[in-house]
Image (cartoon, grey):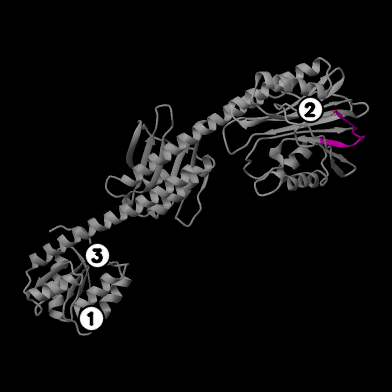
Amino acid sequence: MHVDPATVLVVDDSATKRYLLVSWLTRAGYAVVEAETGTEALELVDAKPVDLVVLDVRLPDMSGFDVCEKIKGNPKHAALPVVHVSAHAVDVADRAHGLNRGADAYLVEPIEPEELVATTQAVLRYYRARKQAELLAQRMALLAETTLAINSAPDFPGLLEAAALGTSKIFLSPVAVVAATGDGDFWAATSQDPEQQPVAGPWQPEQTGDITVGTSFRTDPPDAWSMLDWPADDQVGVATTRIRHDRPPVLVAVPAGLNIPGAPVLRQLAQAIAAAVEAQRSYDEEHRIAITLQRSLLPSRLPEIEGLALARRYEPASAHTEIGGDFYELTVIDGRLLVAIGDVAGHSLHAATVMAELRHALRAYAVEGHPPGAVLARINDLMLKLLPGEVATVCLMSIDSDSGHVRMANAGHLPPLLIVDGEASYIEDRGPLLGLRANRPDDTEFVIPAGATLVLYTDGLIERRDATIDDGLHALAVSATTGSDATLDLFCDRLLAELTGDEMSDDIAVVALRRH
């Protein structure tokens, strides 16, 4: 008679009866361990992997009913099946008492071998079905947590690492998660066990196979996934999901023996990872398109003007794909350097188009020969007539490179920072935002001394959710007056590194100039 491998604990103080029970179960193909007392039985249940207990009702130290109740009362063993056997407690009341205190079956002696084996098989079938259902429920709960983690990942490597960590927790085993970036480069995140933090990196697959659209399951030899140490005498189960014909597949590999028949959890996991990868690819593509458009609306090169060194930086926010309204302008008109920096309210394609209109209008009015204040006044009229409801901040300067003389108008923008001999000061010129009907102050005039540095910037450089605007202005002044940067480009790089975090919540534009 063939049965699935299982370990049965036989508990009986009678050596003769215990010998018979052990013999019948051993011939049926079960692994059997023995105990004479209730205390010994409870110790063995805690120490060894046992699938079923055949338990005599009468034991020398405690009743079988008490042993059964202690086993079932331990959450660790609550599902462990117990079969009572007895030659003395044989009436209906005894059998009912045993079943009520937790037994899964009750056999009355004399017992036939076939009856014992059949009862063992029946109880084990129910036990295994229950364990499988509990395992499936546990894995589905972890699957939900993993799905949330991968959809919350900030980038493609983080997504793969979250997927590998979640898969390792689900299966408590080595795992590999493989997917391709939007450029078609394969990356893999691997984990040997749930305690190991996965690390994603480029991976060159020997072959991904002819994978059709949809989800499939296959078995690979361990040497096909040699980056991990797989359990001995087991194959590697690989779930593959392909969203579209023009997209590379996603592969999730775990030990094959750990899968519930049909691999439902592994299949759903592969589908969830593939959907998240597709969303990340779309996000990355949209972000690249947005940044390309944003940069196309800004000056493509710096003007060369004797006596002044120039540098600029534009860093898009990493928290969203939308392009913003930050802009800058650097151009030479009639021998004077025109410098502008501004910010249109909002993050959207609309904000970027408004920004482009303002930048072109600014250049056009400046070419007509108007001073900064007059240029901003004309732009404000244009916005009131053609762009009602839009608001923007702009700081505009006209600079003579020979003398360092500056004429400036500021429409609600953050004050420029002037650094002279290691001392920083802000050039205050408070005017109303563009897009409002309000009187505007006269232009401010000052001189940039030889060797001094002037910095214009947008609010993304200094504003933080956990600090005031004054804190940000102070941090910028401190950063700008520390360090010894050989070039203006290094100076800008240091400002960005010191003042921004790993993930910027707003676009940043910086323009710096230094008078020789």
Task: Say if mark 3 contacts mark 2, CB within 8 Å.
Answer: no
In percent of width and height, residue 66 lies at 22, 78
Residue 261, disc = none
Q: Is residue 65 left or right of residue 384?
A: left
Identify which residue is drawn at 83% across, 37% down: 428
User: Is 76 located above or below residue 323 in the figure?
Assistant: below
User: Is 379 located above or below residue 492 in the figure?
Assistant: above
Q: Is residue 321 left or right of residue 35?
A: right
The residue beneath circle 2 is 439
The residue beneath circle 1 is 37
**Mark 1, other Cα within 10 Å: few <14 / some 14–19 / many ≥20:** many
Along the line of sight, the residue nearer the viewer: 436 or 186: 436
Q: CA distance from mark 1 to mark 2?
A: 98 Å
Which of discs 1 and 2 lies nearer the camera? The answer is: 2
User: Is 301 located above or below residue 51 in the figure?
Assistant: above
Residue occupying the far bottom of the picture: 60
